[in-house]
Image: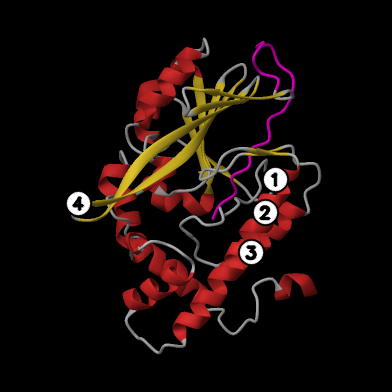
Amino acid sequence: MIPAMVVVKRGGRHPAQDPGELIFSYKEGRRLQISSAIHAIRHPFKVPVAPGVALDRFVYSFVIACDTITLVDTGVAGCEETIFDYIRSIGRDPSEISLILLTHSHPDHIGAAKATRDATGCTVMAHSAERRWIEDTDLQNRERPVPGFSTLVGGPIPLDHEVADGDTIDPDVPVAGDLPVYDDARKSVRSLQRLKRTRNIRILLSAWDEPRSGKAVYDRMDQAAAYLEMIHKAVIQASETGTSDKMEFTKRTAALIGLPPQAVNPLLSRTFAATMKVRDLKDLSAEEKSM
């Protein structure tokens, strides 16, 4: 998972650009002003998992309204209209979007990027590790099949710039109790350890969670770490049944962590398979504690 925390610097000319004062004012139930410059937009969407069955999901994108507008993630295909409407509602214009920062290449983050760029001519930036799947969405669909992929992504988009490790970003935080998505369990733990060492975090803006501030930020990190450990133990327990069927193994593991049957899909199976690679570890944080 590629980093997803954006640092906004003070200064500049536009009156709505200082990110200092926390506001947390809801608008229409799905839109949230974090500060005078930062706005969160919640995008509900559905993921089809079987004929007539769909999972209700949501994801956040973030508008940083300074001299120009930076958009962090774009939601799924079609979300550009919600984003544009919100930008107009705060007295700005979508044409002011100068940059899209994609935190990673998953469909619910890049889905409306092509339409947004086509409409605004903005620059697109992401980590170098995400380039292949952003610029070739058919390749992503082959290598990482997601139910309903073609309905979630508006098409491939070329990157103008790459974000390097150590730039103004830090790792994302998994949401406890949500659908786990990762390819390396230990790297996820290291990401949390790194975030927890960051002092005085004022606001946590996660794609799959409500904005958090103050102590709740660090509480959420602790909950996320506990969730990863619970998944680790559930994978070990499910593997002891001896089943060689990947989807049956996924169903058993999902049940152990409280996920509904309709959540079982190849993406979840891939996550549990990643945890199986480190099943010999007593707990995922053991190495981190000894470092």
Q: Position of residue 194 (x, y in %)?
A: 72, 56
Amino acid type shown at disc 4 = Gly
**Magenta segment, which residues?**
1-18
Q: Residue at x 65, y 44 (%)?
A: 169
Which colour assignment does the render follow? secondary structure
Mark 2, residue position:
221
Question: What residue does disc 3 label?
Answer: 226
Check disc 1 and give the amino acid type.
Val
| Gap in angstroms between the C-alphas marked 2 and 3 | 9 Å
The amino acid at mark 3 is Ala
Tag 4 residue: 52
Structural crowding at the residue carrying mark 2, measured as other residues with C-alpha within 10 Å and reported as few (<14), some (14–19) or many (≥20) = many
Pointer 4 with pointer 1, Cβ within 8 A? no
- Give the alpha-carbon distance from disc 4 to disc 3, as whole Å: 34 Å
- Going from N to C along the chain, the mark reached first, 3 or 1, is 1
Question: Image check: 285 left or right of 271?
Answer: right
